Amino acid sequence: MRIETYHHDTAQGWSQPFDTSLDGPRTLVLVFGDSTLLDDATPLDALTAAYPHSLVMGCSTAGEILDTRINDQSLAVAVTRFERTDLRMASAILADMTDGDAVSEQAGAQLAAQLAGDGLRAVFVLSDGLAVNGSELVRGINAGLSEDVVVTGGLAGDGARFNRTWVISGNRPLPGHVTALGLYGDHIRVGHGSKGGWDIFGPERKVTRSRANVLYELDGRPALDLYKEYLGELADGLPATGLRFPLALRENRDAEKQLVRTILAIDEDAKSMTFAGDIPEGWMAQLMRANFDQLVEGAENAALMTANRGDDTPPAGEPMLAVAISCVGRRMVLGEESEEEVEATQSIFPPGTRQIGFYSYGELSPYATGSCDLHNQTMTLTTFHEIA
């Protein structure tokens, strides 16, 4: 397994010449970049021309991660040549799905059907971040795959603008798409971890009216009005300021498993809020707020969770690819100190690890073990390495 990383910005161009010797059917070219790539794909064209036989995968971001640096309006690229692992790409177009409430689930099922087969060990998913219900997408994927297949990934971002996102499909950046990479064989090892670091505050309330990922009422009160009461003067900046105050969900008051949802849009007329994933009726919901130190500690704990999975960590010096996907809300809180969380994750991994990633509108990972869930406001890590 060999890994090379590259960076591109408009001022400096590409950080170094491409190593085209890595090109081949077992090579993954992973690309994360600004939403403006939709306007000018020239840098992507140069990259795909250098790796014509490789699988190219990527999405737009709310910030690009490369090793311990975070950049905006750039491209972060990792080219990974696997020696013993077969790769396969799948794609789905959200607009092609038929049932309005189940579009995302259908897309997930379509991806799973394309990738399912003997030897499938892991699936890495990147989705449009605005036109998707992440919970339904995960539901469709999980239903079509064996429970022992590790599913991770994330939802594309667009800074705090929430205007447009893209996913690379057919070597082009396109909105409304979902892509997935299948990794096959006995030599691939995939680690995963996901942690938050937010404080819960205020009373726990019952979701009394919702539909899919749209929340209408909490304890019988209009959800948007209640949310604005807590935000105070910050309510004028919704939905962006809502990223600082995600919603914690659990099935009932006795449930230990907790999922976090982040806001994507509001509807002033309906007094509703749209979230990145489902808000089931009858579940309990509670507001959360940031704790700076706990966010950085959460990132570190996600890396520890990933690194402590037995043979999921290679010997020191052996190459490993780490994909870090952190929620845009975390970056808004951490601000100029955001690099502390990517420095924390990198410090846990062994020498020989190359880290790439992005700030997202949602993260996909098992809660701890088992099937995949949609998360918000977490640092989610996926590692890839090969054994002989």
Image: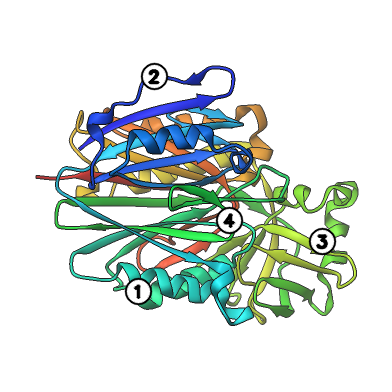
As measured in the structure, the alpha-carbon distance from the residue carrying label 3 to the one carrying label 2 is 48 Å
Q: On screen, 219 above or below 7?
A: below
User: The residue tagged with tag 3: helix, strand or loop?
Assistant: helix
Q: Quadrant of the N terminus?
A: top left
Q: Quadrant of residue 208?
A: bottom right
User: The residue tagged with tag 1: helix, strand or loop?
Assistant: helix
- In the picture, measured across the screen, residue 134 lies left or right of residue 30, that is right
* Residue at position x 71%, y 68% in the image: 204
As measured in the structure, the alpha-carbon distance from the residue carrying label 1 to the one carrying label 3 is 40 Å
Which of discs 4 and 1 lies nearer the camera? The answer is: 1
Which residue lies under the disc numbered 2?
16
Instruction: Between residue 129 and residue 288, name the one nearer to us.
Output: 129
User: The residue tagged with tag 2: helix, strand or loop?
Assistant: loop
User: The residue tagged with tag 4: helix, strand or loop?
Assistant: loop
Which residue lies under the disc numbered 1?
113
The mark nearer the N terminus, 4 or 2, is: 2
Q: Residue 243 location, x and y as percent? A: 70, 50
Which of discs 4 and 3 lies nearer the camera? The answer is: 4
The crowding category of the residue bearing disc 1, from other C-alpha atoms within 10 Å (few below 14, some 14 to 19, many at least 20), is some
The furthest residue to the left: 388
Which residue lies under the disc numbered 3?
227
As measured in the structure, the alpha-carbon distance from the residue carrying label 4 to the one carrying label 3 is 18 Å
Which residue lies under the disc numbered 4?
376
As measured in the structure, the alpha-carbon distance from the residue carrying label 4 to the one carrying label 1 is 26 Å
Q: On screen, 12 above or below 113?
A: above
As measured in the structure, the alpha-carbon distance from the residue carrying label 4 to the one carrying label 2 is 34 Å
Q: Residue 178 location, x and y as percent? A: 49, 60
